Amino acid sequence: MDLLSALMTVTLVHLLAAASPGPDFVMVSQQSLTQGRRAGVLCSLGIALGLSVHIIYSSLGLAAMVSHSVEILTVLKYLAAAYLIWLGVKGLRSRAAEPGVDVSPSVQPRSESRLIAMGFVCNALNPKAPLYFMSLFTLVISPESPLWQIVVLGGWMMLLQFGWFSLVAFLLSRPSVRQKVQRVAHWIDRSLGAVMVAFGVGLLFSEVKR
């Protein structure tokens, strides 16, 4: 497949995959609503950087091996489930702000490195990623594909991921949206935390298939 066709295919498939509800979407939504635009964008950056892990092993041909190794996928599953449940529990413990206290997202912001790391780990530990990337790379890359083409496609996927989730962060952190959620921010945090726990528990009890 030529580069232009590969880019068009990757754009369509990857945007559809990114837009599907999942832990990455929940995390960006949670941080954007409770911490503001900066937090959502930084989490988006971490998620995009997390793709580099999957892109590297896929381009090296390890995705096929990982996707057929029940042991490796099981370890990834438990690590990802534990991380998602831990994030969810933190959201469930969110408390309402005291009357008269400013509850804007600028209060006690998380550090840039922490926000990026949160997004990175959330994406990098996704046990479903090997199957997805193996399928996508098999579709657009052949054994004859030059290294530079793989780099271009991988970089484009990361830009798509960052662009999509940054858009989500911008929309959810708009003043009109933020003002409406300020008084119920802790309930939103708890609700999204419950969704994250549900993702983790569902993953924990899911069956790993070859």
Image: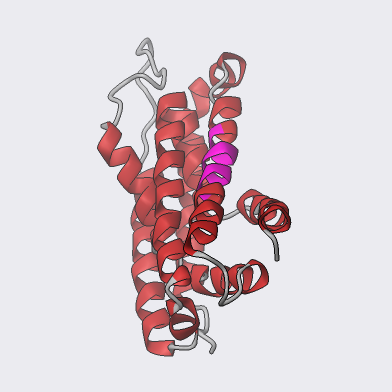
Residue 61 image position (x, y, % from top left): 46, 78
Residue 77 as seen in the image, left or right of residue 166: left
Q: Quadrant of the N terminus?
A: bottom right
Residue drawn at the location 57% of the way across and 28% of the way down: 172
- When asked about the image quadrant of residue 197, the answer is bottom left
Residue 95 versus residue 209 in the image, above or below? above
Q: What's the image's color scheme?
A: secondary structure
Count the marks: how many? 0
Residue 152 versus residue 78 in the image, above or below? above
Q: Nearer the viewer, residue 3 or 123?
A: 3
Q: Nearer the viewer, residue 42 or 22?
A: 42
Residue 43 image position (x, y, % from top left): 41, 40
Residue 47 versus residue 80 in the image, above or below? above
Main SS type for the magenta part?
Answer: helix
Residue 53 image position (x, y, % from top left): 39, 61
Residue 127 shows in the view = no
Residue drawn at the location 44% of the way across and 30% of the way down: 34
In magenta stretch: residue 87: no
Q: Nearer the viewer, residue 172 or 4?
A: 4
Residue drawn at the location 37% of the way across and 23% of the way down: 97
In magenta stretch: residue 160: yes
Magenta residue span: 158-166
Return the residue found at the far top: 100
Q: Nearer the viewer, residue 173 or 161?
A: 161
Residue 113 as seen in the image, left or right of residue 204: left
Residue 167 shows in the view = yes
Residue 93 image position (x, y, % from top left): 35, 43
